[in-house]
Amino acid sequence: MGTLGLDTNARFCWTELGTTDKDKAERFYSRLLGWECTAPPLRTRSGQLIDYALLCISGRYVGGLYPMFRTQKKQGARPQWLSYVQVDDAASTAAAAKRLGASVLAGPLDVFDLGRLTILRDPQGASFGAWQPLRLGAGFQTRDEPGFASWFEHVSDDVELAIRFYGALFGWSRPSAQHGERVLLEQGGAPVASFTVRTQPRASPQWLTFFQVTDCDASCQKLVSLQGSVLAQPSGASGSHRHAVVSDPQGAAFGLLTPPAAGPPPE
């Protein structure tokens, strides 16, 4: 399937948390996943500091963290993890997504001279970002290690509709061989993301970021002790991928994943 945009190498490159309580979120993820928060001296052109922390482990970046804007809270937005796909041109991606039935929530806009971004909501209602790198390079510094992003999963009511949308927008394709309940999409033969049907009626369609942990079950127990919630209990046979869907105390959902070894997503 051809793409409507210009992107032929689109892959997830970043994730960030917008939350109602930045300090509590920092403590929660530090205790659960060992993250440290580094507040860089980011300023607007007028010199105003930007309240955006970088999450890292041993100096390697995991993602970002920021307090939700007042307007977001007034509009009823909930704390959430938002993941970004690297694109060649943020404006073209936004225009193509809109033609495919998505909504443009923000941008395209410049982030200083670091890059350009746009935030979108797909036809199913799941939000995601598109990042066009300029001075700031694209891509996670590390993936598939404990504490770092390991996988991305789209949860919605209509998996086939979601697959058609992202296939047309980014050129993601479905390999002929599929296993398990999840549908895997690839880019250039490499796994990109999985798509699955929403099983929790109260949960909104969304993209879930899965962070790797050494023991999914033990991490879920620790999360509960830190006032988080387990939304989907750990599953996966012994010797296979073990994964769970959880949320932090502010209600932002994410996943925990323990692979048997470095490899593709859970089946």
Image: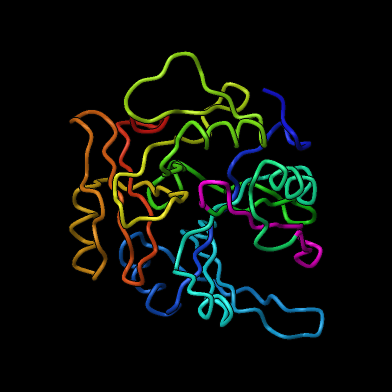
Of 130 and 149, the residue lying toward us: 130
Q: Confirm whether the magenta stretch covers residue 63.
A: no
Side (left or right) of 79 relative to 202: right
Seen from the viewer's position, the closer of residues 125 and 60 is 125
Q: In which quarter of the image is the C terminus?
A: top left
Quarter that holds the N terminus: top right
Above or below residue 58? Residue 226 is: below
Task: Determine the residue positioned at 81% across, 85% down.
Answer: 46
Number of numbered discs on residues: 0
Q: Place residue 204 in its image quadrant.
A: bottom left
In front here: 82 or 256?
82
Q: Could you tell whether 43 is left or right of 147 in the image? A: right
Residue 190 coordinates in the image, percent (x, y): 55, 26
Residue occupying the far top of the picture: 176
Question: Residue 32 appears in which quarter of the rendering?
Answer: bottom left
The magenta span reads 108-126
User: Which color scheme did the rendering employ for the protein?
Assistant: rainbow
Give the percent coordinates (x, y) of residue 175: 51, 18
Q: Residue at x 67, y 37 (%)?
A: 169
Residue at image x 79%, y 67%?
112
The spot of residue 27 in percent (x, y) is 36, 74
- On the picture, is 240 further left or further right than 90? left
Q: Residue at x 62, y 46 (%)?
A: 85
The relative height of residue 118 versus residue 77 in the rendered view (above or below) is: above
Give the image location of residue 39, x and y in percent: 57, 75
Nearer to me, 41 or 67: 67
Going by the image, does 168 lie left or right of 235? right
Q: Does the magenta-highlighted stretch encompass residue 111?
A: yes
